[in-house]
Amino acid sequence: MNTHATIEAPTRELSYAEAIREAMDIALGSDEAVVLMGEDIGVYGGAFQVTGDLVHKYGEDRVIDTPISELGGAGVAVGAALTGLKPIFEFQFSDFAALAMEQIVNQAAKVRYMLGGAVSVPVVMRFPAGSGTGAAAQHSQSIEAWLGHVPGLKVVQPSTPEDVKGMLLAALEDPDPVMIFEHKILYKMKGHVPEGYYTTPIGKAAIRREGKDLSIVATSLMVHKALAAAETLAGEGIDAEVIDLRTVRPMDRETVLNSVRKTGRLVCVYEGVKTLGIGAEISAMVAESDAFDFLDAPIIRLGGAECPIPYNPELEKAAVPQIPDILEAARAIAKGHV
Amino acid sequence: MSIDMTEDSNVPYAIRTYPPEKLKDALRKMYLIRKFEEGAEDSYTRGLIHGTMHLCIGQEASSVGTCLSLTDSDKITSTHRGHGHCIAKGADVAKMFAEFFGKETGYCRGRGGSMHIADPSKGNLGANGIVGGGLPIAVGAALSAKRLGRDDVTICFFGDGANNEGAFHESVNMAAVWKLPVVFVCENNKYGMSTSIDRSTSVKSIADRAKGYDIPGVSVDGNDISAVAEAIETAVARARAGEGPSLVENVTYRWRGHSKSDRNRYRTKEEISDWMERDPIPRFAADLVSHGILSDAEVAELDADTDREIAEAIDFARSGPDPDISALTRDVYTETAA
Ligand SMILES: Cc1ncc(C[n+]2csc(CCOP(=O)(O)OP(=O)(O)O)c2C)c(N)n1
Ligand SMILES: [Mg+2]
């Protein structure tokens, strides 16, 4: 059902975190230029146990614990990428990218352009993201739209173990900086992952469920909520198509527009703050194209509430879209269609 | 019993300097911190509270010794490992627990949780989820005090790991250039998460960082409340006299893992048990008894009283009301009269 070519290799169940580790293991094993950098990624195994035991296999010279220095650490990765290494830099939490925005936004994203194409920056940065862990306002944000706003960066949000492995390997092949947002709640999620080397294309959305009545375009963890909602909707006679956007920049226009041309109804679901976010871009893409003529109902955006992520668990849930919100939105625009 | 009050006597600084009531309160606060942390850990283990927390068991002398000579209008900025600072600065443990339980009756009305507890009424500008986040804020508070003609001093707590953030260096430099009334208090517990200071920091002692900014820097036994208090008094006097900032390094140790998910792979059991033998609490209690400030019976009474206080605080916390979900976006901005 995915729009990308199916991978032929045998698969087995891995968690999302294990799939990332396997991708890094393959990369470290096959290319001396690859190094991992980040805080507590060595003997500790990473705050979310993503790097795990890789330090024991590749040593401290290739799995490098940095001091707690995000600006410097990210910048060192950028400089190393400019000059021959292929660093995979892990932020302990995506929120701490705020400390490194200078190197990400002013340097990594722009240096190739500013130098008239003389250099490129093949750096990969990984960002554990999102809410749902009770870690409150400074450890729970979804900032992919911040980085999505910057020409020069590529920004992806893989939602499955298979995709995160393939997109990390694709990111390493990409000559430009690729930012990978990994929802923390996904780390333990299991799924079939092909063995060996393969890449999953950056810039291609995946249709996770075909449907004819409305299109739900979702990112990351919201894809799973959208799929759960789609099952319930199916029981009510509403046939939802669920699109996993996968890449925030560059966005896959065609997959989204084709779906809207088919269904005439659109709900966007993403965890970042709703206003000025990913949904605004998707909506505008539709409004600026001929797909607009196919719309039978107003577009609905479901995004994060207009506040930092609160600590209290009930407030925390209320701050981001949940399955009942998706159901309500879908029912509202599917009305009269059933 | 008569006490020889001369400086060169064997009587510890704190005992020669502070009245018995203050010393007794200092011991009470050390017990309260220890038991608060144990209560928090227990509530967490029993699944009563969510999120994560960073316990300061073993570091009580640093918090209490540092805050001993402060007034309510003196400010502190704290860290992710901030429960001790908070209690030492006079916070109510019931409201702290209520915050952990995510209740409207908590210090942050359930919005902040462990990493964001603050009590501005006692000069506590707050814990911080960002390593190094409090450093420039402390300098700003000191700038306010100086410009507004207040006698206040600001104490800036930070960890050894934070000394490698750019914010540390920028902050200390500004405070030094502008001769601001701030004391930078490094709680050096030897590790920033899993990374030891030998692996992350170019100087042996954090106090040596002071040289680069031409300010006084001292390193003291952070498990000796008297040594801490003496170093802080000197630094605070200098700050109040308008002579500028100082750096005090309290060398200490955290008994527990960095947070709840730590497997302690980066340190040995022997190292942990060695440090547990240097428990700051019985050490101070023994000093108070041997110098006739308290009897054994009075120490036992403090011990029992603080147990009771913590049990009552947890009861208060558990029975409090949850925040109202409809108030999710309250306090994002200041409400102003129309
Ligand atoms: C900017 C930033 N980077 C990383 C972290 C994750 N983190 C939280 S505490 C910590 C270790 C801090 O070490 P230290 O300053 O020595 O304080 P300690 O935990 O030892 O009290 C780390 C890496 C963070 N919260 N903020
Ligand atoms: Mg430390």
Image (cartoon, rainbow, N blue to C red):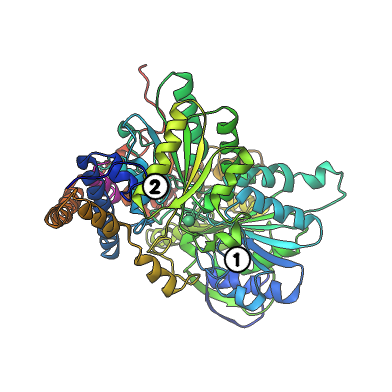
Magenta region includes residue B102: yes
- Where does label 1 land, which residue? A164
- Relative placement, left or right, of A336 versus A64 is left
**Image spot of residue A238 (x, y percent):** 43, 56
Circles 2 and 1: CB distance less than 8 Å?
A: no
Which amino acid, mark 1? Val
Is residue B113 among what the camera can see? no
- Where does label 2 land, which residue? B228
- Relative placement, left or right, of B37 versus A187 is left
| Chief secondary structure of the magenta portion | helix
The residue range painted magenta reads B91-103
**Image spot of residue A45 (x, y percent):** 54, 69
**Image spot of residue A134 (x, y percent):** 38, 54
Callout 2: helix, strand or loop? Answer: helix
Instruction: Place residue B13 in its image quadrant.
Output: top left
Task: Find the distance from the CA under tag 2 to the CA under tag 1.
Answer: 49 Å
Farthest residue toward the bottom?
A: A10
Residue occupying the point 48% across, 70% down: B267
Circle 2: is it few (<14), some (14-19), or many (20+) Cα within 10 Å?
A: many
Q: Is residue A115 above or below residue B222?
A: above
Circle 1: is it few (<14), some (14-19), or many (20+) Cα within 10 Å?
A: many
Residue closest to the eye, B255 or A206: B255
